[in-house]
Image (cartoon, coloured by chain):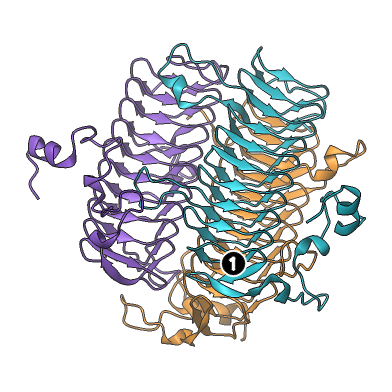
Chain colours: A cyan, B orange, C purple
Amino acid sequence: MQSFQLGKIHPTANVSSSAELGKNVTIGAYSLIHDNVHLGDNSVVGPYCILGEPLSGYYNNSSYVNPRLEIGANSVIRSGTVLYAGSSLGDRFECGHQAIIREKTKAGIRCRISTFAYLQGECEIGDYVTIYGHVRVATGTKLGNYVWVNAYTHFTNDRTPPSQDLVGVTVDDFAIIASRVTILPGVHIGKDAFIGSMSLVRFDVPDETFVAGVPAKERGKVQDIISKKTNKPAYPWRYYFDRGMPWEGMGYDNWAKQAGITE
Amino acid sequence: MQSFQLGKIHPTANVSSSAELGKNVTIGAYSLIHDNVHLGDNSVVGPYCILGEPLSGYYNNSSYVNPRLEIGANSVIRSGTVLYAGSSLGDRFECGHQAIIREKTKAGIRCRISTFAYLQGECEIGDYVTIYGHVRVATGTKLGNYVWVNAYTHFTNDRTPPSQDLVGVTVDDFAIIASRVTILPGVHIGKDAFIGSMSLVRFDVPDETFVAGVPAKERGKVQDIISKKTNKPAYPWRYYFDRGMPWEGMGYDNWAKQAGITE
Amino acid sequence: MQSFQLGKIHPTANVSSSAELGKNVTIGAYSLIHDNVHLGDNSVVGPYCILGEPLSGYYNNSSYVNPRLEIGANSVIRSGTVLYAGSSLGDRFECGHQAIIREKTKAGIRCRISTFAYLQGECEIGDYVTIYGHVRVATGTKLGNYVWVNAYTHFTNDRTPPSQDLVGVTVDDFAIIASRVTILPGVHIGKDAFIGSMSLVRFDVPDETFVAGVPAKERGKVQDIISKKTNKPAYPWRYYFDRGMPWEGMGYDNWAKQAGITE
């Protein structure tokens, strides 16, 4: 294992003296850690990563100071990823290869951003959110907790490109966006909603509603979607799926009761 | 030519002592070759590549052993590509830049995987298959021989995301998937079928059938698609196109007869 | 700031002795500058870039000479980008991260090509063109001046893949292609046209025409699209948007008069 050894900083990695690395961190070969990066304990950074990529002000302001990039403990950043300065990413943050996350991104705990995803920055992401690869998240997007965003999905923000009329998309907790969905600027996706693959979403989607199509139209309630495997409803998914979720092994209801969560 | 010189291992490349490199191989600058990688004779690896990327077990198992990555002879792996450990890729394998291919991928001879493609692993690919860029191939996908997959196409596998109800797509020999096609889990695409650009394929497609649309519907037989250039049928393509194919310069019928292939 | 210091060539960068670097250029860590690259004054190249990537002839021709790659002054090439030899990119050229631009690409002044875009080469791009990320531009594409191409858009060129019947798309000045548009081979997009998000464009689009849908159909004139912010027409956009354009701060009409441009 040449490219990274757990708990070691590879001799070819280039770490700023103003970066603060937690205990037992791993930094892969040829990675670059800029000024003012804070990396939590036990985190692993693969090869060819850039943490704390300087913002555009660096190019023309000789007194530029790199804003703080905060990465929580027990995170895994895979090879080729670029994380700009000025973001805050919670504990157990996980990245695929070659993800790009720009400045002023706030992500909660245990978020996962996959390979070739692009987050334009100035967006807010809750806890336990999964964003698959080749996804684009425009500035101003707000995702709740436990949201799933499948591959190639595009959160847009410009109503009449090119313009300064930018307004982000908002997605509530537990919503599922299937793959290759385009959501137009300012749209609000309700809690537990399901957006079918390849939809173009022009209007708000109410809670627990299933929409699909180009343009997307209402197809029913999410409870109407039946799993071919179990022959029972597949949604709201939190009652049927738990891998990696805080209710893993105990069921959502038990966990919610124990955690004092009431709907 | 600084980044790689044919037949040379660049001094900045990092090659495991347990990797087995064939004769006359080229390794580009800053590339990382992990334990148990086997690279065939005359193969070329560009800069910034990772061959034998360790699987997730590496992160939490101190007795982890990197499974074998087999890459055939006369292969070309372009810059920034990540090939996980545990795959087997046939002779004359060719990769674009920054392709990601995960573990337990089996590919036959002369396969080509282009720039920004992502193969999730545990998939089977026949001989002479071409996968263009920005494509995603989910776990469980099976592609036959001489299959063409155009840009952005997505082979999915989760019927009700997120779930454990995963079932891959199967594509038979000589099928053509045009660009930006989404194929839903478990769908079977028949031999010589043609899927039009931007289709959402929900149901099986019979042999020699042309489908298109969102959702995809049958539009006719592939023989009905006429080339504007020749004013003759364009499909089945093996009778009209031969570049890089084993029948190049001799025609499919002659080659098939010589090779003892009967339909 | 470890990965690049403005005006410096990083000690880990690898620059060919036959490359010609202008005054005050910056080259980031681990970047590779091949033979016959010409980089204009004050340009910045981030880490892990390859400028002058050799063409396929390099692999099998021992007398191969790398064709000239010309990059204009005041350009910014972000990390992980690969620019092939044999292209010409005008002043103030700007690239996102991990863009791939192949040979024989001609781009005018102040073009911007974003993260994860792929240009297949042998295409012509005018002045002040913006190409967002995850876009694909096939060989033979011709884009006029002041064209905007939004994310995931695909300019195709093969009428009956796989074939040798390749014909590119042509886009006239000021046209807007929204995100996730697929334009079929040989289509001509008129001046000031607007193509809605997720369209499949099969036929030519006249000047000042708004089309959308799968397949795309005429929806009206671009003047019919009203900005929700201003409650006035949003197109032709050059009268309502000027950031980064040559008419910034003075209005299009004043600039055009001063520049002697008549429509």
Q: Nearer the viewer, residue B229 or A137?
A: A137
Check disc 1 and give the amino acid type: Ser
Q: Residue at x 75, y 68 (%)?
A: A235
Which residue position is annotated with label 1? A197
Where does the image place residue C192, in percent across and percent down from the top left?
23, 56
Is B11 placed left or right of A62 in the picture?
right
Chain letter of mark 1 equals: A
Is C229 placed left or right of A196 in the picture?
left
Q: Residues within 10 Å of mark 1 (few under 14, many from 20)?
A: many
Where does the image place residue C81, in percent across and percent down from the top left?
48, 37
Q: Is residue B116 visible?
A: no
Q: Secondary structure at mark 1?
A: loop
Q: Nearer the viewer, residue B106 or A161?
A: A161
Where does the image place residue C96, in percent across and percent down from the top left?
46, 37
The image shows a total of numbered marks equal to 1
Q: Is residue C91 visible?
A: yes
Q: Residue at x 38, y 34 (%)?
A: C94
Is B130 placed left or right of C148 in the picture?
right
Q: Where C75 falls versus B225 (above or below)? A: above
Q: Residue at x 65, y 63 (%)?
A: A207
Where does the image place residue B32, in percent across and percent down from the top left?
68, 34
Residue at the far front in the pictured view: A262
Quadrant where the N terminus of chain A sits is: top right
Q: Nearer the viewer, residue A160 or C33?
A: A160
